[in-house]
Image (cartoon, coloured by chain):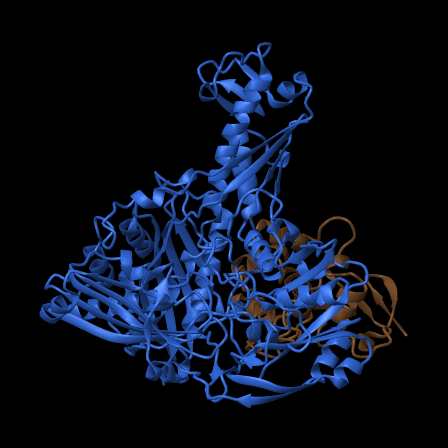
Chain colours: A blue, B brown
Amino acid sequence: MRGAATFAAEFAPENMAYAAVVFATIARGRVTALDIAAATGAPGVVLVLTHENAPRLKPMPLFMTAGKAGGGDDLPILQDAEVHYNGQPIALVLAETLEQAEHAASLIEATYEIDEAVTTLEAGKARGTRTGIAFGQPAHVEIGKPEDELATAAHRFEATYTTPRHNHNAIEPHAVTLYWQDGELYMHDAVQAVNHVAWSVGSVFGLGEDKVHVTSPYVGGGFGSKVLWSHQILAAVAAREAGRPVRLSLSREGVYRTVGGRAQTEQRVALGADAQGRLQALQHTGTVIMSAHNALPEPFILSAQSSYATKSMLLDIQVATLDMLANTFMRAPGEAVGSFGLESAMDELAERLGIDPIELRIRNEPEKDPMKGLPFSSRQVVWCWRTAAERFGWDKRQAPGLRREGEWLVGLGCAMAGYPYQRMPGGAAGITLTADGRAQVSVAAHEMGMGTSTVHTQVAADRLALPMDAIEFRYGDNALPGVVLAGGSQQTASVGSAIIVATRELVKELLQLAGNASPLAGLSADEVGTTHGGLASLADPQRYESYASILSRAGRFELSVVGQAPMPGEGMHWSMHSHGAIFVEARVNAVTGEVRVPRLTGAYDCGRILNPKTATSQLRGGIIMGLGAALMEETQVDPRNGRIMNASLSEYHLPVHLDVPDIEVIFSDIPDPVSPMGARGIGEIGITGVSAAVANAVYNATGKRVRDLPITLDKLL
Amino acid sequence: MALTVNGAPVPVPTDPRVSLLDLLRERLDLTGTKKGCNQGACGACTVLLDGERVLSCLTLAVQADGRSVTTIEGLVEGAMHPLQQAFIEHDGFQCGYCTPGQICSAVAMVEEWRRGSPSNVTQDLADSAIELTHDELRERMSGNLCRCGAHNGIVDAIVATYVTEGAR
C-alpha cells in the first residue's frame, strides 16, 4: 500500500551478489560444449556455475513423495550435460550488479547434441500412455456397468473437450535472497510452503531442516506455483561457492522456463440418461500431458467424483509423457479444467433432453457421495442454484441465437462449481500471552493475499476474547509451529483448528497459574470460557479474572503454549465439499467474433464465512482466473523444439481491467457441522465452473458450441 | 547528472544500462516500486515522472536526468493518500504486489482524464469534458495487471476517491 512491505527480492544483505540464469534451448539432448570464457571475463562477474564445476547435489525431493517434499521436479540440477526439457537451467552467472549478471549470462554459448523429443499431446499418445497416479492412487474409477448403461440409456451424449496449458503468472516473479552462515542456510523466499521448502532444500544439501531457515512474510501471489523449483537450489549453490549472499529474481521469461504450469488435457465426457434426465452412466475419461519427473497428472476427473447421482461411473486419466518442464498444481488442479468438460456436457445434455440445465442438475442431486458412499457433511447445491438464478435473472434466457443487440449476440449460461474440503495433518499454533493483556499467535502459515493474517487475527481475537489490535499474528517462517501448506484450500481449516486447540491449552495453563486466590479457583477448563480479556465461569460469569491479573499475580511476564491440531478425521467419515452455481452473460460480436462478459453472478456454499470482505475477494479472484481460462489464457509451445513461445505477459493474455465486469458473489454462510469453525476452503472454488458457464453462455448467444479452450474469436467466426 | 526522487537529489548511475526501476529498487532501496515483467507488460513498476505515469522498467535512469520522480513511497508525506485509504476500504488488493503500480497509475490517470486526454474507448475525441464511464476508467487502468483478481475493488477505490458518479 505504501510500498513498505518487504518481498523476497527486497531483502538486502551486505555484500550481496546478483544471479542470472541461462536456459537450454533444446527439448532433449545434451550440452556438448559450453563456452563461458567471455562471461567469466566480463566486468563484475564473480562466478559462472555450470554442470562442469557445480558441486554434487541430490535432486529435489518430488512433491508428495514424502511428508514435506516440496520439489516441482526431481531432475538433477547442473549435475550432468543432459537436457530434459527446453528451458532447463544450464548455467548461472553471479556478478556484482544485476546488469553485469544479465549481460554476462547473455555471453554464454551452448552447443548441443539434439535427440528426438516428444513435445505434443498427439506424439505422446502415439508413444503410448499409462494410467495416471494421482494423490497416490491410480486415477481410474469404475462403478456399476458404465459401458452397458451408456449403450442402453434412453438418451446419450458424448463429446471431447480440450484445455491448453496454463501458467500461474503471479505478478511477483519467483525470487529468493539467501546467504550461508556457519553451515546454515538463511532464505528470504517467495513461497507458499516454508516447511516443505526448508526440509526439501535441506535434503538436497544433506542438511537437517533445522539448518535451513526460510522466511516468506509477503508473497506476491502463488496460486500453486510458489514451492521449490530449481532457482532456489541454484541460488543456494552459488552463495555457498562464492561465500556471499545472493539474490536470484527470475525474469518473467525465467519464470515460464523454471516454474511449471497447468497441463494440457483432452477429456471425453459421455453421459447416458433415462427419459427424465437421470444419469445412468457418467463417463469422464481422457489424456493429460506430463513430464517424466513430476507428481501430478492433472486430475480432471475430480468434479465428476461427487457432482451427480449416477447409476454407473467410469473415470480414467491416461498420461502422455512429454519432454517438457514439469507441470504442477495450479488453482483448483483438476476441477478448474475438469469442470469445463463435465459442466459443458451437462448443458449439452440438457438441451438434447429439452430440460432447463438447472433443472437437469437438480434432478441429479446425489443423496450421498456417489463414489465414496459417505454422507455429505453439508450440501446446499439447490440453494446455490435457486439463489444465483433469481439474482441473475435466469428467467430471461432465450433459445440459442435469438437475442441480438446491435452487433452483439447475447447469451446466458451457467455451471456448477465445486471444490473439496481438505485439512492436512501437521497444523499447530503457538500462543504467547503477555502480562499487558496482549497475545502473539504464531503459525508457519502463509499470506499470499488470501487474507490469512486478517482472518486468523480475527479467529484468535474471537477465541481469546481480546480486541483484534491486541493480537499479533506471526506467520511465514519455518521456525514457527506447524507444517501448514497454503494449498488445497486447506490453510484456514488447518490453522483455525490449531488455534482452537492452543486456546484450550492456554486456558488449562491459566487455571493452574490462577491458583486458590483467584475467583476461578476450583474450576476446570471445561467450566470456564474466555471473555473480556480473561476467563470466567460459564455457570457464574461473575467469577472472572483477566489474563493480565492471572499472570501478574503469578509473577509471570508471559505464558506460552503450543497446540497441535488433531489428525484430520472428519474427511474419513464425511464427504465434504464447497459448492456453487456460477452464471454468466456473454456477448459475442456478430461481425468480429469477439466475446465479452459483462456480468457474472455466483452463489456459493462454503460453510461459515469468517470474513465476508476477504472471502468475496477470494471468490472474485478465482472467477477472474476462470474468465481468463475461458477467453484468453493459453501457454503456447513450439512443437518443433518444445519451447514455450509466449513466455511473457504481453503474449500470455490475462484478464485486464476492461475485461473484468462487476462480479456478484453471494454466500450461504451455513456452517459446516463437522469442520473446525464451520468453515470450508474458499481459495480455489471460484475458478471452477467458470469456463463452462462462459462456453454455455456463448452457445446460448450464438448457437455455436466451443469445446476447446480458450474461446477465442477465430473459433466463433 | 542528477535526478530528483521523492524530492531528494540522486546522482544518475554511471552504468547506462541501469533502468529507472533497478535504480530505485537495487540502488536506492525504494522497493515499493515492483518488478513484475521488466518488459512493459504488467504496469507493476509504474511511477510518476514529472507527474506523468511511466513504466520505470522501460525508462533508463539516464533518461530521468534533470527530472523529478515520484514513487509510491513519496506519494504523500506522513499520512495515507486518500486513494491508498480507499484501496484498504474497498479491498483493492490481495497480495499487494501490483498495488503500488495501480495506485501511481490511477493518480496520474485521473490527471490525464481531467485535462481531457482521450483513451482508446473515447467516442468523441473532440469532447472537452470526457465522462469517466465504466469503460473509460477500466480502459485507462488496463495497463496495470492484477493476477489475484482485485479488479472490482481497485475500480471501486478509484471511483470512491475521484468520481462521485458516472463510472459505475
On the image, the x and y values in percent for residue A668 come to 36, 46
On the image, the x and y values in percent for residue A15 come to 81, 62
- Residue at coordinates 56% horizontally, 60% vertically from top-left? A221
Rendered view: B58 above or below A380: below
Query: Can you say which quadrant of the picture contains the N terminus of chain B?
Result: bottom right
When asked about the image quadrant of residue A243, the answer is: bottom right
B165 lies left or right of A715: right
- Residue at coordinates 50% horizontally, 61% vertically from top-left? A224
On the image, the x and y values in percent for residue A343 come to 29, 65
- Mark yes or no: residue A173 visible: no
Rendered view: A377 above or below B68: above
Q: Residue furthest top?
A: A517
A170 lies left or right of B106: left
Choose between A76 and A43: the one closer to the eye: A76
Q: How many numbered marks are there?
A: 0
Choose between A165 and A275: the one closer to the eye: A165
Rendered view: A532 above or below A91: above
On the image, the x and y values in percent for residue A83 come to 55, 80
- Mark yes or no: residue A508 visible: yes
B51 lies left or right of A128: right
Choose between B46 and A503: the one closer to the eye: A503
- Residue at coordinates 74% horizontally, 80% vertically from top-left? A104
Rendered view: A614 above or below B125: above
- Residue at coordinates 54% horizontally, 56% vertically from top-left? B153
